[in-house]
Amino acid sequence: MNERQGFKFFAVFLNMAWFAVFVLVPGLMVVVVSFLARATGTFFALPFTLSHYRELMDPVYARVLGNSLIYSLNTTLLCLFISYPFAWLLSRAPRQKRPLLLMMVIIPFWTSSLIRTYALVILMKANGIINTVLLATGIISEPLPMLYTDFAVYVGLVYSLLPFMILPLYAVMEKMDTRLMEAARDLGATGFQVFYHVVLPLSLPGIMAGCIMVFLPAMGLFYIPDLLGGAKTMLVGNFIKNQFLTTVNWPFGSAASVFLLLLMVLMLGIYFFLSSRFNRNQAS
Amino acid sequence: MTVVRLQNVSKSFNNQAVIDNLCLDIFKGEFLTLLGPSGCGKTTVLRLIAGLETCDSGTLFINGRDQTRLPACERDVNTVFQSYALFPHMNVFDNIAFGLTLKKIPARQIRDRVQEALELVKLEGLNNRPIHQLSGGQQQRVAIARAIVNRPLILLLDEPLSALDYKLRKQMRLDLRQLHRKLGITFVFVTHDQEEALTLSDRVVVMNHGRIQQTGTPKDIYETPVNLFVADFVGESNIFDATVTKLLGPDMEIRIQGVSKMVENRRGFQEGQAVKVLLRPEDMTVERTRQQCPEGFLPAQVKEMIYKGTTVDLILRLDNGQQVFVTEFFNEDEQDIFYDVNERVCVSWIKGWEVTLADE
């Protein structure tokens, strides 16, 4: 084995070991626990049971899931509509300015999203920055109720997940050949028709990737509804967190986690199926 | 009849003039070629006609109407792009039908017209083929079909053959000429390839630095270039510095490197004027030397002899060091056109075959 292969082996091994210890093993533990009985003191105990999964089928939890799906879906659509024009302008900006603009999208990643969520709380509180400014300038006479509303939850979710939509969209748009748009105009397409017949179909891979990258994390971001929605809205992520930390029902929380995981795997499967079919249709 | 008129059109990018006060009339049904080196503004002229760029100043008339500000989508003009710019997410049929679909033409009519266009470019039966499964030559033909299916007033072609290999390019040239004859549409063709320009066009416009250098038939351009740029850019030329020594009616005597030679005086040159004499390689004659060159011949030495099948190309060096290119054809009178390297020869031309320009 020469040095190069040795390094390759080492790098791959390190990654595999990392994932095994911190992802695979805990994941398997969650799966195992989900089939165990609840116990006080030890958190879980034998015998194996399917009761937690049966319990999950209860309509109460179906509503939690439905709620989460609606929040995630709305967040995804909001992100898409905000990001699409933004990513477009970014991809059409002068070449020298693009790295800077892209940097500005990425900079917020440097701070923990939990801390950024707290920052939003400070902005939107009844006596927060926005209300103070609006009151001081006389635009409003009493504080706007913003924190602990659906509005705040959406602001938080969209704000945290926006870059995940912008980046894949930017990636496809940047590669898009302007000459195709010129060709469409030349053939009689108006601005909207160029968008509808050429730009939109060609940015579809980016739209699909962005939607997946926003939709899936949105399902699990428990601390945003917690901090900004005042835990009034129960989402799958909050529900799981509560099972572990509040109700101390580890097996039931595990079952819910496994269920969410399977749901995500299913959606990823659909995504890969669709995108591979799409790529086969228009490989360049 | 004029179908496009560019009147004092100027265009600059980043404060750099690309088109400088250009005037050009394009006639209905002609095959016009814009010829020039890269960066001469020829593609910009095409894009201005297409409406993909707008004139900074000047007026553009299409079919007699001022369409300077008309958006591209409303102009009765279609373009074949250099890179083809075919829509990768559509198959051959949808690409060609694109323009017709936008015009809300009934589906049956679209099918017939796409079929007709496919036949014109000899691509029958490829309707459902995705674009990425086509060869370069086929993509080229789809691009042409996509434009002509709209039956535009003018078809613009932006270096459409530059991406094809030599054999395919020659075939496409013939096909384009046939297509032009069949359709009767005005073709405006952009190229930097002088051979393409000469073989295809009814008229050639030679451009440089955003200005028109010469407009004329291929024969005009090749045989009577109006300036050194055209002479140099179109075909190969030998350029001699000379001085007019004597005026003799329609002719004049000039002196080139100590040799006197009679040439025609078509531009009213005066005695003592410095001139440039241009000669095509195939217009030069070479004689084997017998001690001294005959009158009007320049002494030279053979530097290189290149056998090319139908011709023999000679590179000669005059005594002052200037290189002269000569092309000799095989013919029955003169069997012996092979020369030895370093052989002393004499070179001249038949009076009247030269183009004489004032020394700029």
Image (cartoon, rainbow, N blue to C red):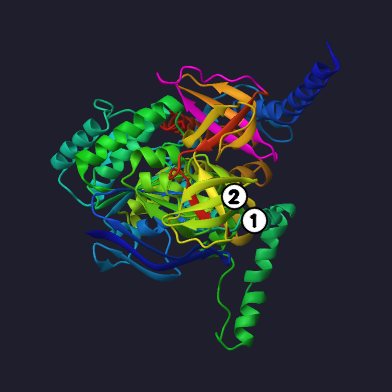
The answer to whether B288 appears left or right of A27 in the picture is left
Q: Which mark is residue A190?
A: none
Residue B255's tag is: 2
Q: CA distance from mark 2 to mark 1?
A: 74 Å
Q: Which residue is mark 1?
A: A105
In the displayed structure image, the side of residue B279 where residue B205 appears, left or right: left
- Is residue B137 among what the camera can see? yes
Q: Residue at x 66, y 25 (%)?
A: A28
Residue A168 screen position, x and y as percent: 56, 45
Give yes or no for residue A242 being in the magenta stretch.
Answer: no
The quadrant of the image that shows the C terminus of chain B is: bottom right
Rendered view: B105 above or below B162: below
Task: Say which chain tag 1 marks.
Answer: A
**Viewer-proximal residue, A146 or A34?**
A146
Span shown in magenta: B316-341
Residue at (42, 25) in percent of width and height: B167
Amino acid under disc 2:
Arg
Secondary structure mostly seen in magenta is: loop
Q: Is residue A83 visible?
A: no
Residue B334 located within the stretch drawn in magenta: yes
